[in-house]
Image (spheres, rainbow, N blue to C red):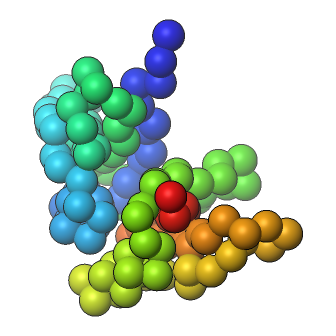
């Protein structure tokens, strides 16, 4: 068994695709509209779905925003340099919510960014 994808609901698919592809550097792997169900699925990631886990962006055409709730935590991405990644994300218009630095009670360098719908993405320096 392996993890295939994590699905998140997004209010504006174009805005979310721009964030994940242009700011985080993922690729749009596939996208399909389901007119009868009034939704679109778009899959983004750094590698093909057959090679690694990806993110499924679900856009329900009649819903422009969602409450995130308190059960979802974050998506984590490995980065070579968290400080440089934060600088690049800010330069591209992304929102850094926790600047790069050592985690509380440890030495691992982490940062947090937020996508257009408010989902948290942790950057972990490897």
Q: Residue furthest top?
A: 1
Residue located 80% across and 73% down the image: 104
Q: Position of residue 111 (x, y in %)?
A: 56, 73
Residue visible at 21% across and 32% down in the picture: 48
Which sits in the foreground, 94 or 33? 94
- In the picture shown, does residue 125 fall above or below 42? below
In the displayed structure, does residue 86 sit left or right of residue 101?
left
User: Foreground: 101 or 41?
Assistant: 101
Horizontal side of residue 3 vs 109, given as left or right: left
Drawn side of residue 56 relative to residue 43, left or right? right
Q: How many marks?
A: 0
User: Is residue 9 visible to the viewer in this orientation of the structure?
Assistant: yes
From the top left corner, tell me how far across and down residue 125 is, in percent: 52, 64
Percent coordinates x, y for residue 38 in the rendering:
24, 37
Look at the image and tell me whether residue 119 can be seen: no
Q: Position of residue 118 (x, y in %)?
A: 50, 67
For the point 17% across and 49% down, the residue is 27
Q: Is residue 14 above or below residue 103?
A: above
Pick out the residue farthest to the right: 105
Name above or below for residue 5 compared with residue 106.
above
Residue drawn at x 31%, y 82% is 88
């Amino acid at each position: 068994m392996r993890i295939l994808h994590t699905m998140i609901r997004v209010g504006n698919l174009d805005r979310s695709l721009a964030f994940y592809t242009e700011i985080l550097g993922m690729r749009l792997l596939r996208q399909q509209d389901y007119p009868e169900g009034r939704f679109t699925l778009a899959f983004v990631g750094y590698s093909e779905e057959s090679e690694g886990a990806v993110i499924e962006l679900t856009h329900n055409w009649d819903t422009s925003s969602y409450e995130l709730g308190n059960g979802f935590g974050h998506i984590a991405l490995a980065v070579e340099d968290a400080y440089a990644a934060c600088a690049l994300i800010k330069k591209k218009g992304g929102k850094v919510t926790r600047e790069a630095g050592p985690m509380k009670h440890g030495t691992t360098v982490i940062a947090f960014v937020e996508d257009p719908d408010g989902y948290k993405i942790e950057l972990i320096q490897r």
